[in-house]
């Protein structure tokens, strides 16, 4: 059985693990499933990887992460490469954390875009 989580429609109230990412200038608060924090990719590393991937000749399409965990790398790819993204995660709490983190990054990017205008 599977569940579809839409980042703009999820609620973080059932998640207990959160921590600021000290590698981000904004000190972004990312959510994690229990014991997920040690496995999460730091935001600046995720952005660096996205810049490297973006230098490649990517075909058109959706970015798919078949083991998205906390969703931090997926969020970096989606925002830096500016593509739609789909994350797949077997653990329901990690999937929820991923959806919340994608929502957090989308809101941050929208705020930064509106400040530039």
Image (spheres, helix red, strand yellow):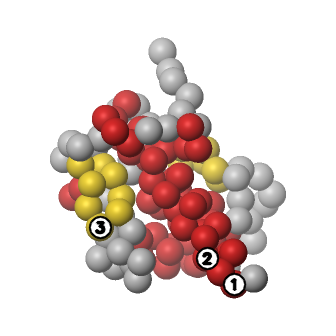
The mark that comes first in sequence, 2 or 3, is 3
Q: Residues within 10 Å of mark 3 (few under 14, many from 20)?
A: few
CA neighbours of label 1 inside 10 A, class few (<14), some (14 to 19), many (20+): few
| Above-or-below relation of 73 to 111 | above
Element carrying mark 1: helix
Label 1–label 2 contact, CB within 8 A: yes
Which image quadrant is residue 91 in?
top left
Task: Give the residue pinned by disc 2.
Answer: 112
Above-or-below relation of 9 to 63: above
Quadrant assignment for the C terminus: bottom right
Q: Which of marks 1 and 3 is in front?
A: 1
Between the C-alphas of marks 1 and 2, the distance is 6 Å
Q: How far apart are marks 2 and 3 (CA)?
A: 18 Å
Residue 67 rendering spot, x and y as whole percentages: 44, 44
Residue at x 59%, y 60% (from the top left corner)? 106
Looking at the picture, how far across and down is residue 64, in whole percent?
A: 61, 47
In the rendered image, which residue does mark 3 sit on?
Answer: 20
Crowding near pointer 2: few (<14 within 10 Å), some, many (20+)? few
Nearer the observer, 78 or 101:
101
Q: Is mark 3 on a helix, strand or loop?
A: strand
Residue at 56% x, 72% y is: 50
- The residue furthest right is 60
């Amino acid at each position: 059985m599977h569940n579809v989580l839409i980042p703009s429609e999820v609620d973080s109230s059932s998640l207990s693990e959160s921590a600021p990412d000290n590698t981000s200038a904004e000190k972004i608060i990312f959510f994690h499933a229990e014991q997920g924090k040690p496995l999460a990719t730091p935001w600046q590393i995720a952005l660096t990887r996205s810049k490297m991937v973006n230098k490649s000749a990517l075909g058109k399409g959706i970015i798919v992460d078949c083991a998205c965990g906390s969703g931090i790398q997926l969020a970096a790819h989606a925002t830096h490469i500016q593509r739609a993204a789909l994350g797949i995660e077997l653990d329901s709490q990690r999937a929820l954390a991923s959806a919340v983190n994608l929502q957090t990054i989308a809101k941050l990017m929208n705020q930064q875009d509106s400040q530039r205008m």
